[in-house]
Amino acid sequence: MRRAIATVCLSGMLREKLQAAAAARFDGVEIFENDLLQFPGSAAEVRRIAEDLNLSIDLFQPFRDFDAADPAQLARNLARAERKFDLMAELGTTMLLVCSSVQPDALGDADALAEQFARLAELAGRRGMFVAYEALAWGTRVNRFAQAWEVVRRVDHPHLGLALDSFHTLSVRDDPAPIAQLPGQKIFFVQLADAPWVNTDVLTHSRHYRCYPGQGEFDVTGFTRAVVDAGYAGPLSLEIFNDEFRSAPARANAVDAMRSLLWLEEQVRHHGGTPPVAKVPLFDPPAVPPLQGWSFVEFAVDPATGARLADWLQRTGFACIGRHRSKDVALYGQGALRLVLNLEADSAARSHFDLHGPSVCALALATPDAPAALARAEALLCPRVASRIGQQELTMPGVRAPDGSLLYFCAPPVDGRHPFEADFVLDEAALAEAPLGAAARIDHVVSVVPPGQVEPWLLFQRAVLGLAAERSVVLHDPYGVIRSRELESADRAVRWSVTVSERDNTSSARAVAQFHGAGVEQIAVQVPDLVAAARALQARGAPLLPVPANYYDDLQARFGLDDALLAELQSLGILYDREAGGGELLQLYLAPFDERFHFELIERRGGYQGYGAPNAPVRLAAMALWREQA
Amino acid sequence: MRRAIATVCLSGMLREKLQAAAAARFDGVEIFENDLLQFPGSAAEVRRIAEDLNLSIDLFQPFRDFDAADPAQLARNLARAERKFDLMAELGTTMLLVCSSVQPDALGDADALAEQFARLAELAGRRGMFVAYEALAWGTRVNRFAQAWEVVRRVDHPHLGLALDSFHTLSVRDDPAPIAQLPGQKIFFVQLADAPWVNTDVLTHSRHYRCYPGQGEFDVTGFTRAVVDAGYAGPLSLEIFNDEFRSAPARANAVDAMRSLLWLEEQVRHHGGTPPVAKVPLFDPPAVPPLQGWSFVEFAVDPATGARLADWLQRTGFACIGRHRSKDVALYGQGALRLVLNLEADSAARSHFDLHGPSVCALALATPDAPAALARAEALLCPRVASRIGQQELTMPGVRAPDGSLLYFCAPPVDGRHPFEADFVLDEAALAEAPLGAAARIDHVVSVVPPGQVEPWLLFQRAVLGLAAERSVVLHDPYGVIRSRELESADRAVRWSVTVSERDNTSSARAVAQFHGAGVEQIAVQVPDLVAAARALQARGAPLLPVPANYYDDLQARFGLDDALLAELQSLGILYDREAGGGELLQLYLAPFDERFHFELIERRGGYQGYGAPNAPVRLAAMALWREQA
């Protein structure tokens, strides 16, 4: 379908917005009136800029409060429309969005409205213009699409049609299904927006919380499918009012916008099990790859930090099990866990190190069809990464994640051995030990992102990888609030949380500020027996995070644990939680490496599914104490 | 009254919190359980720290979900209470806050509750402990103080009383008046919190939006008066859950907390017109000073920027009208407007310049009793400023504002001449000209503050100066959202807005980031005839901010202005707005000085009371364009 974006979605001045939309390969734009008012040139100049960028101007908006009980006011409104038609002619667009009135004296009677809209349609027709009438969710009298349709139907004029907006329908939990029965050619324009469900009024919800489809919780797919089923063949246009987007880099944000529409078209294609009889083709990328877990975590280091990290890893039970055949890269492992230390001088890892210091520069996911996973990511506008390949070495398909780190797709292990190990000269003997247990696997990874970057990440993880945002939790660091979104694949083989902190003093915010963006801060390893693993690490001198005794006193009061278990947990610094269903979680934190990243070891018993959020304040305070004393 | 603060209000680890509370001269604290769990030492150690700081521990909290339908659960809860009494004994406190249950099976029947609470009271009594029962606004069955009181009344045990919290009563619009009829000695504890009215659920409201009394919109004064009238003589204790406070500097935040309680006690004293018959004295500072407008604005400059600023001011119609008798300070003026350029090497102004660059370092308010204004500010914990005084010069009472700039109190002008001018050698001839009009006066000042600093500013302006926060508006800069709080004195002689921007790209955020905090960014001068003033400034070569032509096209469509007026406004770059009541505003913006501050000239016609918010997007875009081209 044609893809458009409203200029209000993007930050900056009008010219920058148009350039960003064109760079993201949009077909057209909606010109938001405020953007035009601020533009220091004529409407004709805007038209030329758009033409040069190969962008059509699909809509001019909004025209507010047209209908009026007072005939003099109606006459003024028609005169106002005339002036806007003049402007549109200069701008080179023919479609005007008229939204339902929010005035106290707005009309509600369909006949009376039809009479006034007939006059407007007549006027538009004489000028070769078209009016798309939209029911705002907070319109005084007209606030459902069915009401606007009733007016359009009665007027029955070729220059008056309907404008539909997913937000106005879904935010008030109106049913979009009847849209499929409308005559498609009378739907003049379709705007799309998603949003999270927030407990607030609909106007605040609309003005501050809209986001791109795939970033929120609305059923935008169902809405769009109804529009497609009606036979609508016009543009799908994004109209997002979002405080973050207003200050986001316009070009990156426009790419997100396009990714969102492409993903949405794919969803619409598969919605309800039967393909739609669409008048225009819908985007059809390779399917979401089946993900079988994390293959490895790669660290960017230089020789000095590499040596310290190697020591840190060895105390955590990892041995150096291989050297890359052609690069200055070491492989660490135990059981099936793999970590890569990349010291290669001319590499993406070194670029990452130079900017961010010792850090996770790449993650790798296991999937049986890595080329297909890459093809999907590329189809969804992720930049492909090309690495130098030595003779007879494997190519490893990979893309850039939103923060510039890399995400690789690897073939899954066979008999406990990873195919990518073929690129390494291995030391099999070093793999003999596995203090965390042979069955240890990465349970989840936590990435810290700067404020404003949560939505881009959600879309990347959802669209490219098919992860779903399961929970949103607030964590209390002693120095402020951290918000965490927990994303998971359908079978939970891959869990990848994203956390953000607004203020400068939390551990997350410090990491973002001190290291130009933080990236992965936690690698959580699921172990079969945490008490055994903790003892093994204690024996190796691993830097376990001390837990205050008061925590155990309260644990006893809350859960009535038996004294022996409690003593054991306390002696090892293991945190404990129990879900209502009886599932139990044991957690052990290792002290962070250079305030950058740390390991968590967890044991899930009896189907515990969360991440131990009730323990977060104690853990974050323990981290803060560690930092103070370091 | 005794003043206390809950540790949850303050950022950091428990020791820092206690130190901050003591430094702000609190009498006691509530220990929030999570703070104790995170403390890496025993409860006895916390007790010693508090004793060393001369702080009493007035409460331990919260104890949740006590009552239970299941007798086994009740037994477990009583056992849990025993453990907490042990802890409290070690901590050296005797008061436990028990909040109403939020479990699905919480009891609602007063008799059943009374039976269970009688057991708890009995247990507490045997240990020398006291239980304060609080109705959470979101308690499953018990969610109003009257219900909790009914339980306390039936149990009638000396160790069971009521805990009241202004948030739980006011957020659900429950009437606090009946509290005045309760027996004061059965009110065991009183917690206070204010909040803005936000459209969200009560739990979200409570957990993220609470603020100190005076920073929000609740009638905390009425609530507290009812408590005092009941005969309550215990501590007034602040309990604030606020995302900003969790990361605010603890010591400054604790001072704000104390300022808020002092202000509140004064309000309670005057509430309803009759003084309360309080069992304990309420704070009684000097009254809010009558404010008669702004006396002067003082700029910190060095010789180079001072010369540029002088030139900039001269083009705006200001002449150098005097030199300070003993300091390197110049006085600029026209009509009754006064600006001070401070180049003195060893001064607060120079400190300000060194940190912030050319900037407004002081503001001065006109009030007939400046010493009383100073006394009030000092009573409310504002640091007094001592300036060096030359022979026979006037002392000018002043205090530090929250951002470290100075606020002076001056005697008002007599016959258009300011008493403080006595310290200057004046050039009367230079005052002859007044291009902005002899009646020009400062209409309002706008200060930019960093994120997290709005609440401290609101409290400062409200408590110290008696300003009220009239409106909260969202302004759209092309690069993001700016939020503005408009504060005014009762008669609007003084208007002082505070704006904040979360993200880095708006004009406000850039100013904060580039100049280590921004301070005053706009000085709005009200003139009798803006068209005449604009012409005069144009003739002098003042840097007027260009306004895009498209703006006037839309103005015509919206307001139907007559063509001559429209042409005149456009030729001068004057913005226009009209309120529903017919009041009109004319606005003219001058280009900013070094992206730091700018003048706005406004003419209010027919009682226009706002600030022209509808024009903000165009003005902010014009500023951005100016910046790009500069």
Image (tube, coloured by chain):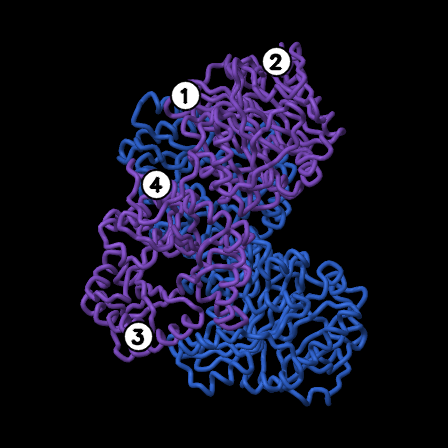
Chain colours: A purple, B blue
| Residue type at numbered disc 4 | Arg
| Residue type at numbered disc 3 | Arg
Nearer to us: label 4 or label 1: 4
Q: Quadrant of residue A345?
A: top right
Which residue is disc 1 drawn over? A607
Helix, strand or loop at mark 1: loop
The answer for how far apart the CA atoms under marks 4 and 1 are is 35 Å
Report the side of B506 relative to B540 (left or right).
left
Nearer to us: label 3 or label 2: 3
Percent position of residue B113, x then y: 31, 33
| Residue type at numbered disc 2 | Ala
Helix, strand or loop at mark 4: helix
The answer for how far apart the CA atoms under marks 4 and 3 are is 39 Å
Label 4 vs 3, first from the N-terminus: 3
Chain on which label 3 sits: A
The answer for how far apart the CA atoms under marks 4 and 2 are is 52 Å
Percent position of residue B437, x then y: 59, 86
Which residue is disc 3 drawn over? A126
Label number found at residue A269: 4
